[in-house]
């Protein structure tokens, strides 16, 4: 009987002496693993967010360059809305990243359109009320100035409007 008590004590003491450090190591390792994994995920998400932001910046920079180049086309100064419409339709075929192009007279009336469902001779302030202020700024702008609206819900979903004055070498 005494032998059983001693052997039970030795076994229980051995288990306690070996299991307690094992559990301590387990919890320390688990804590370090969790912290390391969390840090890695945070760093990876930050890197992806920076890449996404850079891609968005690059996208807008390219569209702004596109609209600057388009605004300097001589045909946009033409008095023939059909020629202007054909030209901007060709631009939309070649540049799939632009949804609509509207050419607006200084009076605010749309004189040519492609890609959208806007009526010719409609006022830009009626078609895009949220972009009316941008249009007023565009009237005062010079060559190379581009204005970008806040995102708004339009024909193709959530969109932004880019506006620039039609310019020639004199302005």
Image (tube, helix red, strand yellow):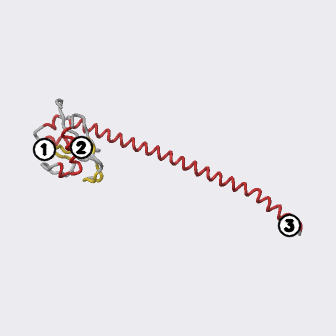
> Is label 3 in contact with label 1 (beta carbons under 8 Å)?
no
Q: Residue furthest right?
A: 2
Q: How many marks?
A: 3
Q: Residue furthest left?
A: 79
The residue depicted at 21 percent of the width and 48 percent of the height is 132
Give whichever of 83, 131 is nearer the camera.
131
SS at circle 2: helix
Residue with the mark numbered 1:
107
Q: In front of the other: label 3 or label 1? A: 1
The numbered mark at residue 92 is: 2
What residue do we see at 69% from left, 56% from top? Answer: 23
Secondary structure beneath disc 1?
A: loop
Q: Say the numbered circle drawn on residue 27.
A: none
Q: Are marks 3 and 2 in contact (CB under 8 Å)?
A: no
- In front of the other: 102 or 34: 34
- Residue 28, x across and y down, in percent: 65, 52
Q: Quadrant of the C terminus?
A: top left
């Amino acid at each position: 009987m005494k032998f059983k008590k001693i052997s039970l004590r030795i076994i229980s003491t051995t288990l306690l002496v070996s299991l307690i450090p094992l559990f301590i190591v387990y919890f320390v390792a688990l804590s370090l693993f969790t912290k390391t994994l969390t840090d890695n995920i945070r760093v990876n998400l930050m890197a992806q967010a920076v890449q996404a932001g850079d891609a968005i910046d690059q996208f807008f920079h390219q569209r702004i360059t596109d609209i600057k180049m388009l605004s300097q086309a001589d045909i946009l100064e033409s008095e023939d809305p059909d020629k202007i419409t054909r030209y901007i339709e060709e631009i939309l075929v070649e540049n799939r990243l632009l949804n609509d192009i509207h050419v607006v007279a200084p009076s605010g009336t749309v004189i040519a359109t492609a890609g959208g469902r806007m009526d010719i001779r409609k006022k830009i302030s009626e078609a895009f009320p949220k972009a009316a202020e941008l249009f007023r700024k565009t009237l005062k702008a010079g060559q190379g100035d581009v204005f970008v609206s806040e995102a708004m819900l339009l024909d193709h979903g959530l969109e932004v409007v880019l506006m620039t004055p039609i310019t020639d070498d004199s302005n």
